[in-house]
Every structure is written in C-alpha cells, then in structure tokens.
Image (cartoon, helix red, strand yellow):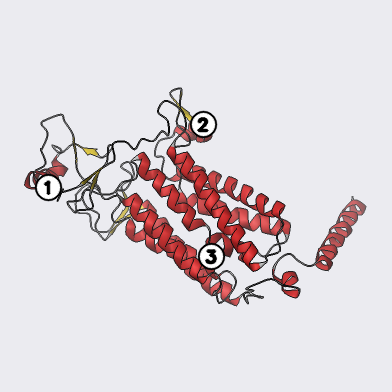
Amino acid sequence: MPLSIPFPAWLKPEIIPGLPFRWYGLMYIIAFGVAYWLYRRQVKERNFPISEEDLTGLFFWGIMSLVLGARIFATIVYETSDIYRKQPWLVFWPFQNGRFTGLQGMSYHGGVIGGIAAILVYSARKHFDYREIGDMFAASIPLGYTFGRLGNFINGELFGRITAGRFGMVFPMGEISPLSPEYAAVREGAELLGFPVPRFGEVMNLPRYPSQLFEALFEGLILWAIIWFFRNRKPFKGFLIGLYLAGYGVFRFFIEYFREPDADLGYRIELVPNGLPPAVSHPLTSFSTGQIFSFLMAALGLVWFFIAAKLPDHEPVRVYTGEAVNQGGRLNKDKQKKKEQEKKRRRKLRKKLR
C-alpha cells in the first residue's frame, strides 16, 4: 500500500492551459447555480409568496454582497502587508504582473457577513420576513459551498498539515525546507518512512491532509443534509439560520486542526507554545484565525436560537396559503398602503417645517 496519494498530475487550475478560465471560478458559478436551484425548489414546495423578479434580485444582490464581504474581509484580516491600504484599488483588480489571476483571496466568514447584510436590507425593502428568507438560504448554501472547496483542491491550495497517515496527499505547493532546525522531527520522520531527504539548499514535499476535501464533506454535504432534513421540521422561524451558523462553526473549528494556518499569520492564540511549525503540529491549545471566527460563528448561532424562539410571530409556516401568505410572506396590502401614507405625511410635514 502506498504511503500517500499523489496529487493528480492532469489536474490544473486552468480549464484550458493558456486561457484565463480557471476551475476555481467555474466552481463558484456552479455553487451559485446549485444554491439558486435549491432555493427555487423551497419556494415552490412551500408556495412562498415571492415573484420571479424578486427572487432573481435577491440572489443578485446576495451574491454581490457575499463577494464584496469575502474579498474585503480577506484583505483586512488575512493580508499582513500594507499593499491594499496603500493601493486600495487592487482589492478588486484581477491582474498580477500583467497576467489575469482573478480575485485571489476570499474569506468565507466575510462572505457570511456580506450575505446576512444583503438578506436584512433586501427583506426590509421588499417587506419580506428575513427569518423565512434566511432559513431558505441556510438550506441552500452548504451544498453550493462544497464546490467552492473543490475549487480550492483543484488549485492545490489551503491544504492541511504534514501527515504519515494513509490519507496523506502530496500537493505541488507543499514544499518545506527540512534542513531548518524547526523541521528536525520532520526530517527524522521522513527518513524512517523512506522518503529521500534532500541536500542543503533543496526542498522536499511530504504528504498533507487534503483538508479541502474534509471541508467539502463536512461543511458542505453533511451540513447541507442535516439542514435539508429540518427544513420542513423546524420548530420556529429562523431555526435553520441558527443551525447553519452553529453547524458550520463547529465543523470548521475542528477541521482547522488538520489544516495548516496561513504561513504569515500562524496561530493567533497559543496558550501552550510547543515550538513546532504549524505545518507539523497543531496543539489543542493553539487557535488559528479561522478557528477564532468559527467559534464566534457557532456562538452567534446558539445565541440566535434563543432569540429567534422568543420573537413575535415565530411559529413556522410549512406551506403558505391564504391568510398565511399575508402573515408570513409579504406584508398585506393594507399595511403597505398605511406605510406609504405615513411616509407621504412625514414628507409633507418636513416641507412645512422648512
């Protein structure tokens, strides 16, 4: 049995070599398409009162806010240099050294913040119940997220720590310099396993955990299956939002123990430092940036459970018909007219005061 799985040599970031079309971008398109299809399915099966135009608008602004949040958050939190502060236009500039590279560097947690903002704003403008809109998003996003992590895998990025286990994979960009003092244990382990240790000035590439696939499985497929099961069994409006936040936060927190932190960031919290590089060891008492945000995300999900269960009109509506449409979907026409009349009255009052 081989000691590791080689990364597929035929798998390249570009769909067609030499052309600026990458699998990572295609995976994002597939992810949004899958989420949109699942959302429409829920709208139809529940007879939710939303027009095709509003549904398209909701997804358009949701995607825009998600991308903006993910990109801006990544440049603020994960970029250690001052390049974006000095040249902010580069945040959304998809070229490097005259070559098209796309937007490299997206933060999932930033995307969540952007997506939540879009749901709240759009729901307020269109008079939808944000809990219902958010619940249907929660049951749609994780399956699409699976394809995003597959894109990371194809890029050969965001791989895990070094491992001697049977699931280890040799990634093209996973080289280390084993002659550095902190990698002495790695060098000794490589010799015991029969890996050739390079000479001075050379690098070696050891098997890593394919953590992108772990995330695709647990934070994508499994989390989606759990939420999808509860979509018609939720005890109150907003339940799926909390389940998504808490579920993703817990899964991501533990998977981070298999993933190597960003080299320029390392661990943000080290309660008991052990002196080993992050590529080799992730102590239980050391926490990466992703773990900190995942913990906060899970905590927010738990808090939201208690809040959503106490909010007025929290009873779930399985299928919208007749009166239920007026109560749970759009506000009824009388309420809308009253709001418009109140706005007109206030505008007239302001003009008189001037």
Measure the alpha-carbon separation of dots 1 and 3: 44 Å
Helix or strand or loop: what does disc 3 sit on? helix
Distance in Å between CA atoms under marks 2 and 1: 41 Å
| Residue 292 position in % (x across, y down) | 39, 57
Residue 184, above or below 38 = above
Q: Residue at x 20, y 51 (%)?
A: 163
Q: Amino acid at mark 1?
A: Ala
Circle 1 sits on which residue?
185
- In the image, is residue 165 above or below residue 155? below
Disc with the residue nearer the chain's start (1 vs 3): 1
* Three-letter residue code for mark 2: Trp
> Percent x, y for residue 146?
43, 53
Q: Residues within 10 Å of mark 3 (few under 14, many from 20)?
A: many
Quadrant hosting residue 342:
bottom right
Residue under label 2:
93
Q: Secondary structure at mark 2?
A: loop
Residue 302 point in image, percent of width and height: 47, 70
Seen at 87% across and 61% down, the residue is: 341
Q: Amino acid at mark 3?
A: Ile
Where disc 1 sits, the SS reads helix
Comparing 269 with 141, the one in front is 141
| Residue for badge 3 | 241
Q: Would you say 332 lies left or right of 123 here?
A: right
Label 1 crowd (10 A; few <14 / some 14-19 / many >=20): few
The count of marks equals 3
